[in-house]
Amino acid sequence: MPNRIAIDERWCVRPLGSTCERCSIVCPAQAISLDTGEVPRISEELCTSCALCAGICDAFVATDILSLDVLTHAMSSAERTGAVYITCMEALPDDVYEPAGNVIVLTCLAELSPEVWIALLAHRIPITICCDESTCASCTQAGTRGYPMWDYALGKARQVTSGDVTFESRIPQRESLMHDLGGIDEGDRREIAEDIGTTLKDLASGERRKRTSTVVDDLLTLQERMHTRAFTADAQTSVLALKSAYKPRVIPPSLELLKRAVEADPDIANRIPLTIAKLNKAACACNDHPCTKKCPTHALRTEFGTSKISYDPKSCIGCGYCSAVCPAQAITLSLMTAEIFV
């Protein structure tokens, strides 16, 4: 089934006044349109389902595999087979090629956010990437933006975790299909193997990424200016619970991935910067607490049955809504680290 991109508009921070436009910046097909105060709209005619937007914002969900599922599947495959392979559809030899069960096939590797890579490497999962820049160059879905995006995300994870991946041209094939090739003569098998392989290049250099696209630099500039991010609700939080008087806190997938990464390797926590709200309770002077009215994750909320404010930084996404509406200026955005999860 082809990959599709979905948006859960309940979780976009643009209606809260945010000017976030990262999704529009990364989209290679200009399929995302933004109107002030409204959630993004995706043009079905223009969208190539590359999922680059899902790699930089939790509000965009690729239906082929969720970000948390990538970690779960990788951990399971590593335990079962001792190896995990990640590739893209562009790298598959043809439409009928069936990869082995420990191969994760994505529309584009840029579908994986830095948080996914950090979690994968923090768990020390043996990962082999069956893709390179030459594969990306001919991609009809992500275009030239795919490679710099996943190269940056992987590079950031390497820096944070001191972990690494290996690269290989061969994409493991499902065993039953390999048996079907048993009757093919040696020459044809060799030709098939050569077709499957891709020419590996030196992926350690970031200079090529800088030359091929400025999209990463554009995103980093925007991030420095805004310190904002959108998110999707945790799958275990029911709609009924969200509609109740008591607002359960929600940890967005990207933060959940960082939390799991820190649990796997606590030493990396101080290397992961997070911009989150800082609450000065002593300066809080109001009773209606407007900061809690639209907090997307309910990191800020009033305790059930009281007017006392409660704050959990582990759920904060740093959108800045609370700081903007606080009449007492008791809330500021501060640079912290993932040590909040320790």
Image (cartoon, rainbow, N blue to C red):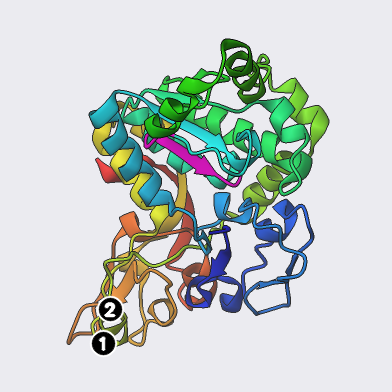
Question: Mark 2 falls on what kind of element?
Answer: loop
Magenta range? 100-108
Q: Position of residue 4 (x, y in %)?
A: 58, 63
**Residue designated by label 1:** 244
Location of residue 162 with respect to 255 vertically, above or below? above
Q: Does residue 104 show up magenta in the picture?
A: yes
Label 1, label 2: how far apart the Cα atoms are: 7 Å
- At label 2, the amino acid type is Lys
Q: Residue at 34%, 34% (x, y): give it.
A: 269
Q: Does residue 297 show up magenta in the picture?
A: no
Within 10 Å of the Cα at label 2, are there few (<14), some (14-19), or many (20+) other Cα atoms?
some
Question: Mark 1 falls on what kind of element?
Answer: loop
Residue 291 occupies which quadrant of the picture? bottom left
Q: Position of residue 218 (x, y in %)?
A: 74, 45
Q: Residue furthest left?
A: 305
Within 10 Å of the Cα at label 1, are there few (<14), some (14-19), or many (20+) other Cα atoms?
few
Asked whether 245 or 304 is in front, the reply is 245
Please count the marks in the image: 2
Q: Residue at 79%, 61% (x, y): give it.
A: 30
- At label 1, the amino acid type is Ser
**Residue designated by label 2:** 247
Location of residue 227 with respect to 44 vertically, above or below? above
Asked whether 154 or 192 is in front, the reply is 192
**Residue 127 visible to the viewer:** yes
Cβ atoms at labels 1 and 2 below 8 Å apart: yes
Left or right, residue 24 beside residue 98? right
Residue 143 occupies which quadrant of the picture? top right
**Dividing the image into 4 quarters, which one contains the C terminus?**
top left
**Residue 272 visible to the viewer:** no
Q: Position of residue 88 (x, y in %)?
A: 58, 39
Q: Position of residue 166 (x, y in %)?
A: 49, 18
